[in-house]
């Protein structure tokens, strides 16, 4: 039950972040084939980066032992704080998203990596917390696909405030999950 709670706590913020990125692209009014390509790229990177993070996290977790859970909580808190960080991120992200909308070939790899750093951090946390890789990745891939499709389709109808609000809620949700996990760990539940 605890793994289900933690996985759900990770999926909501990831879905909101993915939605925010896809909505930004949707505001550009992409053609149908570009929406499908973007959905595949987002799903691949949003599911692939947590795999890398989880493998690193599990390896680090076996090294850290009992302290691994605290490391996972710290990385969740960090990921949430990064989503709340204002300033340069939005202009850099907007530029990367404009490039992604029209990128082909190896340029997609570079841009996909640059927009999925948050997912690497989430994967690292999940690995340190000992979550199942298969279950976590399947759920992340499903949420990435759905959130990307919804964001791309609604992006043209939504304003920048909604997109930024979704990122803010994602950051706050990750910090809350980290705090709940810390409280549970300290109470030894």
Image: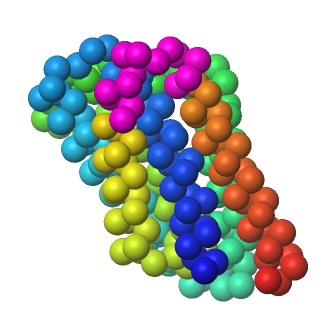
Task: Tell me which residue sits at (52%, 76%) in the image.
Answer: 131
Task: Tell me which residue sits at (52%, 16%) in the image.
Answer: 160
Quadrant in which residue 51 is drawn = bottom left
Magenta residue span: 150-163
Q: Is residue 110 visible?
A: no
Quadrant in which residue 155 is drawn = top left
Task: Tell me which residue sits at (36%, 74%) in the image.
Answer: 134
Q: 44 left or right of 143?
A: left
Residue 101, magenta (yes or no) = no
Q: Nearer the viewer, residue 91 or 26?
A: 26
Q: Tell me the quadrant of the picture where the C terminus can be found.
A: bottom right
Q: 175 left or right of 186?
A: left
Q: Is residue 13 above or below residue 186?
A: above
Percent of width and height locating residue 80: 66, 45
Percent of width and height locating residue 67: 72, 78
Q: Nearer the viewer, residue 153 or 85?
A: 153
Q: 189 left or right of 137?
A: right
The colour scheme applied to this rendered structure is: rainbow
Q: Furthest-right residue in view?
A: 187
Q: Is residue 22 above or below residue 71?
A: above
Q: Is residue 19 visible?
A: yes
Task: Tell me which residue sits at (43%, 31%) in the image.
Answer: 21
Percent of width and height locating residue 83: 61, 37
């Amino acid at each position: 039950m605890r793994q289900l709670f933690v996985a759900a706590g990770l999926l909501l913020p990831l879905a909101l972040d993915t939605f925010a990125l896809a909505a930004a692209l949707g505001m550009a009014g992409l053609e149908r084939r570009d929406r499908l390509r973007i959905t595949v790229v987002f799903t691949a990177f949003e599911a692939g980066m947590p795999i890398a993070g989880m493998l690193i996290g599990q390896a680090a977790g076996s090294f850290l032992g009992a302290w691994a859970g605290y490391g996972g909580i710290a990385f969740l808190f960090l990921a949430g704080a990064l989503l709340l960080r204002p300033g340069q991120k939005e202009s850099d992200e907007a530029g990367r998203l404009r490039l992604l909308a029209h990128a082909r070939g190896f340029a997609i790899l570079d841009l996909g990596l640059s927009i999925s750093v948050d997912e690497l951090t989430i994967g690292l946390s999940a690995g340190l917390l000992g979550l199942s890789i298969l279950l976590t990745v399947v759920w992340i891939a499903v949420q990435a696909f759905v959130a990307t499709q919804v964001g791309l389709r609604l992006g043209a109808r939504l304003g920048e405030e909604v997109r930024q609000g979704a990122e803010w809620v994602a950051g706050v949700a990750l910090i809350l999950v980290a705090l709940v996990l810390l409280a549970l760990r300290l109470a030894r539940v």
